[in-house]
Image (spheres, helix red, strand yellow):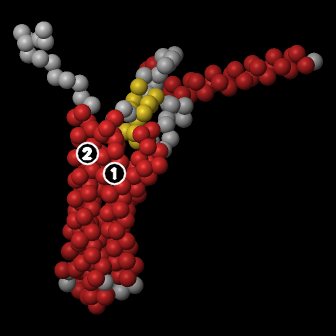
Amino acid sequence: MRQPNRVHFILVLGLVFWSLGIAGCAGGRVTFHVSNSASLQTVDADLEYAQLQADSTRKALDELVLSDPPDLGRAYREFTERATRMNLVGERLVRHADGLEYRGKSYLVEAEKSATECQYPRLSNTARTKPLELGAAFDPIAAAAISVRRAYRAFESDLSNIRSALSANTTTKGIETVDIFIRKAAVDEESLTRALGQARARVQDAKTAGLPPSPLPVGKERQ
């Protein structure tokens, strides 16, 4: 009786692995996805989006400060919406900085072809990933990301204090009580925007360094 049970177990186990392999080809997200990682393109896109959100959040705060009493409610809602979007992308920036600091070079990945071709290539919508070879370009990116994280945390704290105070007192008097946080937010937004620009520059440097050399004009091939 033991032999049939053992054979049955092996057959079932093989079926499970075969099913997972098909799922990996069709979806790829579970089988091939590298968790807690990001591509250089993803980091760059998040940095760019954060630049836009920091600017729009600052403008919404300026409008709130300058609004007449009848418009304060609308201006506060607009500011809150912008601040919420800033927080969402800001947490992505924090995740990138944490990954670069604590996981190191393995955090940044690039796509590669599967070692074994998928049996159903037309169903495959993702590729495997491997660590991105950045060499000396990695450390400047990591340092810039950490600076972004620090600048974002300062700006996020300002926004939180302003929102908390005005949520119960959306009046001109309430705005006066948070004047110190509003002025600090202006300074911290500038610091964040500057840090984001520097981080994007480091990413662009890495992209440029990784490009293949341009072909020489015809007739000027290296001897």
User: In terms of image quadrants, where is residue 169?
Assistant: bottom left
Q: Is residue 76 visible?
A: yes
Residue beneath the point at 27% across and 31% down: 210
Against 29, residue 85 (above or below) is below
Say which element carries label 1: helix
Reading the image, the residue beneath label 2 is: 202
Q: Does the residue at mark 1 contact the one at mark 2 (Cβ under 8 Å)?
A: yes
Say which element carries label 2: helix
User: In terms of image quadrants, where is residue 137?
Assistant: top left
Neighbour tally class for label 1: few under 14, some 14-19, many 20 plus, Cα within 10 Å:
some
Q: Amino acid at mark 2?
A: Arg
Residue beneath the point at 61% across and 27% down: 20
**Residue 100 on image: x %, y %:** 41, 47
**Residue 212 on image: x %, y %:** 23, 24
Q: CA distance from mark 1 to mark 2?
A: 10 Å
Q: How many numbered discs, if any?
A: 2
Q: Nearer the viewer, residue 206 or 33?
A: 206
**Residue 214 on image: x %, y %:** 16, 22
Residue beneath the point at 24% across and 33% down: 209
User: In terms of image quadrants, where is residue 1?
Assistant: top right
Residue 143, numbered label: 1
Residue beneath the point at 23% across and 71% down: 187
Which of disc 2 and disc 1 is earlier in sequence? 1
Q: Amino acid at mark 1?
A: Ala
Judged left or right of residue 152, residue 118 is right
Q: In this view, which residue lies farthest toward the right?
A: 1
Image quadrant for the C terminus? top left
**Residue 199 on image: x %, y %:** 27, 50
